[in-house]
Amino acid sequence: DIQMTQSPSTLSASVGDRVTITCRASQSISSWLAWYQQKPGKAPNLLIYKASSLENGVPSRFSGSGSGTEFTLTISSLQPDDFATYYCQQYNSLWTFGQGTKVEVK
Amino acid sequence: EVQLVESGGGLVQPGGSLRLSCAASGFTFSSYEMTWVRQAPGKGLEWVSYISGGGETTYYADSVKGRFTISRDNAKNSLYLQMNSLRAEDTAVYYCARDRANTFDIWGQGTMVTVSS
């Protein structure tokens, strides 16, 4: 089974900050990685697929990069609506989510 | 509007059974693979099960294999998850999601399953 490890688990930031979340796979997954945003009490929302492709309707301040085993999600300028938990997900072999990164107010 | 609506959650005793349903609307249901994802209280997301558009192919997480069965009725635009031999660790919000090229682009609002005596 492929394991996904995100870091950090919690990130404290302010509006306007550049934020980066890292996701590592236990083996190569090529570019078969997605990122989701989840707010409390709500279903997750797809942000990025195939490591770096922005889902329709997602603001351009979100970007993804990486391939193989190392991936990053970057928010170029954090907005009030972006305080949430973010999950990476591999889909190279079935599906596995990372444990999540909570972006909280500093 | 593209929409998924889950139902069927509730309180069940350990060892009991429950059947979840997911009603799809706003898209050609039979053209899409579908999946179930769960989230235990205060925890992260866990993929549970997948089914192909025609229902011929299914996959399960090891944690539910042999206990859960995924199925679909394309004539009714509905997805199901039959859950047997339920355990306390199955307590979670269960989401159905549309699978678009192996990413989950549309999610339902979730239905809560509580396994407790």
Image (cartoon, coloured by chain):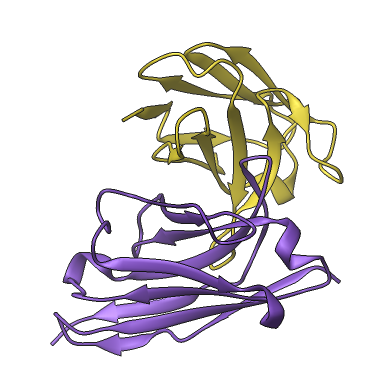
Chain colours: A yellow, B purple
Residue A62 visible in the picture: no
Above or below, comparing residue A60 to residue B26 in the picture:
above
Q: In this view, does A53 lie to the left or right of A98?
A: right
Above or below, comparing residue B72 to residue A81 in the picture:
below
Above or below, comparing residue B66 to residue B16 in the picture:
above
Q: Is residue A60 left or right of residue B5?
A: right
Image quarter where the N terminus of chain A lies is top left
Residue A27 visible in the picture: yes
Please tell me which residue lies in front, B100 or B112: B100
Q: In this view, does A3 lie to the left or right of B23?
A: left
Residue visible at 86% across and 46% down?
A57
When asked about the image quadrant of residue B117, the answer is bottom left
- Give the mark count: 0
Please tell me which residue lies in front, A60 or A18: A60
When asked about the image quadrant of residue B66, the answer is bottom left
Residue at the outermost front position: B56
Above or below, comparing residue B68 to residue A93 in the picture:
below
Q: Where is residue B47 in the image (x, y as percent from the top left)?
A: 43, 51
Residue visible at 30% across and 88% down?
B11
Residue visible at 73% across and 66% down?
B29
Q: Position of residue B62 (x, y in %)?
A: 26, 48
Q: Where is residue A63 in the image (x, y as percent from the top left)?
A: 74, 25
Please tell me which residue lies in front, A67 or B29: B29
